[in-house]
Image (cartoon, helix red, strand yellow):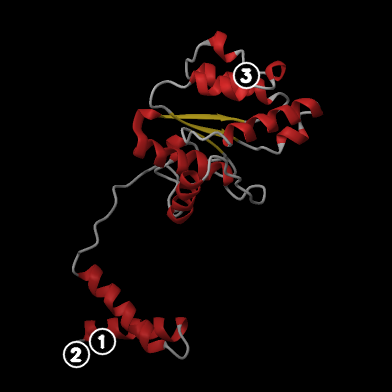
């Protein structure tokens, strides 16, 4: 064994002694394989991205999907949930990444699967969830007169207005971000009930073309 190989072996042994206890030999072997893998230049480097992948406490948006890596398992679970039900409740502690999972994970993935058929309607409830929902529809250029039917005044059938607004072959994903605002910011209990009743009735429709989360 030449001096260079001896040096490398010493590095492996040191790494094994530090990282492993009873199974140090396994660690040494695994480390050796990694070293050989790199030495054979079989690892291809990703093109350097000069931008920082960390955005602090801000949520990831759809345009940040390339930075939103390492969550493939959760994105896959979200896809499964959407396929299984029309209404999905995403629960988690504040700041745990729920909004980012939908915005930068689920929505881009569905966009890849469905293409232009996917219409994502994202809004927070704030003081008036109906007003914010109508605004989200206006951004997508739906008929403004028809959108007016989505209101507290038409509480009994506003979910039917959603169905009538859908264009052929469209698949809607309605993401009510920060749903807790319906109780923390909206002070009208009748409006709260009307909105909740509507989204539950919409989810109970046999059609699978509108999903809510």
Position of 95 compared to 80: left or right? right
Question: Are the residues flagged by discs 1 and 2 in contact, CB closer than 8 Å?
Answer: yes
- What kind of element bears circle 3? loop
Marks 3/1: CA distance?
A: 74 Å
User: Which circle, 3 or 1, is nearer the viewer?
Assistant: 3
> Residue 127: x and y, percent?
73, 25
Position of 28 compared to 182: left or right? left
| Vertical arrangement, residue 91 with respect to residue 164, above or below | below
Which callout, 1 or 2, points at the residue further toward the start of the chain?
A: 2
Q: Residues within 10 Å of mark 3 (few under 14, many from 20)?
A: many
- What kind of element bears circle 2? loop
Marks 1/2: CA distance?
A: 6 Å
Which residue is farthest front? 206
| Vertical arrangement, residue 39 with respect to residue 69, above or below | below
> In the image, which disc is placed on residue 190?
none
- Read off the residue under disc 3: 150
> Residue 167: x and y, percent?
42, 20
> In the image, which disc is placed on residue 6?
1
Q: Quadrant of the C terminus?
A: top right
User: Which circle, 2 or 3, is nearer the viewer?
Assistant: 3
> In the image, which disc is placed on residue 1?
2
Position of 164 compared to 190: left or right? left
Which callout, 2 or 3, points at the residue further toward the start of the chain?
A: 2
């Amino acid at each position: 064994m030449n001096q260079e190989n001896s040096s490398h072996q010493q590095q492996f042994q040191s790494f094994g002694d530090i990282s492993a206890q009873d199974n140090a030999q396994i660690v040494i072997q695994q480390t050796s394989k990694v070293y050989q893998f790199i030495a054979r230049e079989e690892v291809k480097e990703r093109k350097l991205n000069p931008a920082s992948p960390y955005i602090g406490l801000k949520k990831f948006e759809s345009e940040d999907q390339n930075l939103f890596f390492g969550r493939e398992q959760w994105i896959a679970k979200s896809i499964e949930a959407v396929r299984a039900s029309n209404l999905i409740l995403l629960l988690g502690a504040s700041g745990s990444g729920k909004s980012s999972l939908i915005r930068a994970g689920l929505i881009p993935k569905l966009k890849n699967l469905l293409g232009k058929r996917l219409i994502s309607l994202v809004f927070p409830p704030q003081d008036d969830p109906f007003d914010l929902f109508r605004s989200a529809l206006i951004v997508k250029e739906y008929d403004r007169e028809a959108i007016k039917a989505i209101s507290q005044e038409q509480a009994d059938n506003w979910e039917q207005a959603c169905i009538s607004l859908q264009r052929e072959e469209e698949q809607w994903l309605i993401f009510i971000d920060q749903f807790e605002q319906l109780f923390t910011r909206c002070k009208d209990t009748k409006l709260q009930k009307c909105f909740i009743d509507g989204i539950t009735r919409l989810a109970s429709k046999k059609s699978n073309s509108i999903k809510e989360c």
